[in-house]
Image (cartoon, helix red, strand yellow):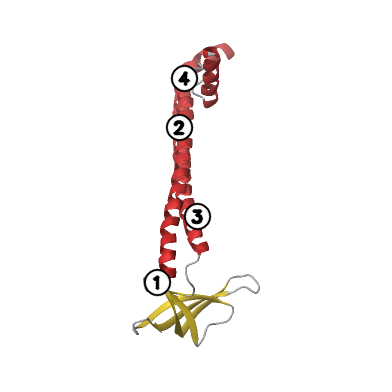
Amino acid sequence: MAHHSNRRGSAVLRKLGLDENPLRRGSDRIQSFSLLVIGLFIVLGCVLGVRTGLSVYEHERQVEIVDARDGYQVMARVLEVSTSVPTGREGATTAHITRVTWQDEQGREHMDTITVRKADRPHGDIRLWIDARGTASASPRSAGRTLGLAFMQGLGVTSWTAIAAAVAYVAICALLNLRRRRQWDDEWVLVEPQWRRQVL
């Protein structure tokens, strides 16, 4: 059983390029080991991305709950529509960059620029949502937005980890290839005279 285990271990090392094969160069072993480390780094990045996504989701979910409890709706007066950008889909809504003014629950006047998504150009009075921090938006924070934000944050961490790992591996391979070319040149200086005598 121990012999079988040793054979399996040797096979794994051979597949990873870390065995004691005399034909395998030191640079080959360094490249194989680097690939293994970078693979583990990417796995760690995936785990970190998931944890980041979950952490962001928990935080944003709490914000969503507080906004639903303490937020309120107001009627706002449209002062100006500066930009209207179609989404490109037939029959879909258009993003209108709109300057509005409204009064909070204490009667204080506020003015802000928000994005209103609707088919028609907004005018007159529109309904706004004021969250727990006093920030105006066209609608309350949705569960889909919370989930989307958490997903994008987690994906961002994972993506940047993978990109950093890929760049590191490419750099390592470039340095190793440079080292191999130098070794080849040094060995060729020694071998060429003997080769010329035999061939020529």
Q: Secondary structure at mark 3?
A: helix
Mark 1 or 2: in front is: 1
Residue 174 seen in the figure = no
Q: Give me the C-alpha separation between circle 1 and circle 2.
A: 53 Å
The tag earlier along the polypeptide, 4 or 3, is 3
Residue named by callout 3: 151
Residue farthest toward the right in the current orientation of the protein? 90
Which quarter of the figure is the N terminus placed in?
top right
Residue named by callout 1: 70
| Identity, as a three-letter code, of the amino acid under mark 2 | Ser
Q: State the image coordinates of residue 198 (x, y, percent, origin top left).
A: 56, 11
Q: In percent of the image, x 51 and y 86: which residue is there?
A: 123
Mark 2 or 4: in front is: 2
Residue named by callout 2: 34
Q: Give me the C-alpha separation between circle 3 and circle 1.
A: 26 Å
Residue 20 seen in the figure = yes
> Circles 4 and 3: CB distance less than 8 Å?
no
> Circles 2 and 4: CB distance less than 8 Å?
no
Q: In percent of the image, x 58 and y 14: which residue is there?
A: 199
Q: Secondary structure at mark 2?
A: helix
Which mark, residue 41?
none
Residue named by callout 4: 187
The tag earlier along the polypeptide, 2 or 3, is 2
Which quarter of the figure is the C terminus placed in?
top right
